[in-house]
Amino acid sequence: MAAVKKELIGMLNKALELEHAARIQYLCHAELIKGLNAEKIIDRLTEIASDEEKHEKKFRNLIGNYLDGEPSMGMAPTHRASEVPEILKINRKGEKEAIDFYKEIYQKVVDAKKDLPYEFETLEHEIRHVILDEEEHVAELTVLLGD
Ligand SMILES: [Fe+2]
Ligand SMILES: [Fe+2]
């Protein structure tokens, strides 16, 4: 196996672990939100969590079916928060960190195009689309934060 494929499996597994953590964190934070405007925020957080679940599936598929690797069952660290602004801020920070890391993976894929003759377009497309979703999550959390 080309060295770059091994490297990509490692990076995508780290991304998969970030997605596991993000989904659990959004769902747990959603349970803590109470009060007059709770429902809209809860709906938004659970909707984002379901996007993260779709990202997990994409990453597992890329790792297992396109790169012949083994998808991780692990999870990156999660972060506790209690008040709504803190919850929104901590998740927005996580989204931005994920975007920064996914852009590194994207660049690695672009640089390795010639070593990925039957995988490049799928990897490029899927990772790019996950980045678009994460940018949408940042925008949605920013609307709720109103900053
Ligand atoms: Fe995600
Ligand atoms: Fe996200």
Image (cartoon, rainbow, N blue to C red):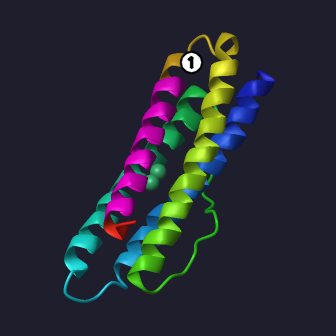
In-image side of 48 versus 37 (left or right)? right
Res. 103 visible in picture: yes
Q: Which residue is mark 1?
A: 120
Residue placed at 64% from the left, 25% from the top?
A: 109
Q: Is residue 119 visible?
A: no
Segment colored magenta:
123-143
As for residue 128 lying within the magenta part, the answer is yes
Judged from the image, the secondary structure of the residue bearing numbered disc 1 is helix
**In this image, 46 relative to 89: left or right?**
left
Q: Residue furthest bottom?
A: 35
Image quarter where the N terminus lies is top right
What residue is shown at x 68% (from left), y 37% (from top)? 9
Residue 112 place in picture, x, y as percent: 69, 19
Figure quadrant of residue 11? top right
**Image quarter of residue 143:** bottom left
Left or right: 47 with respect to 127? Answer: left
**Along the viewing direction, whichever of 117 and 22 lies nearer the viewer:** 22
- Viewer-proximal residue among 97 and 69: 97
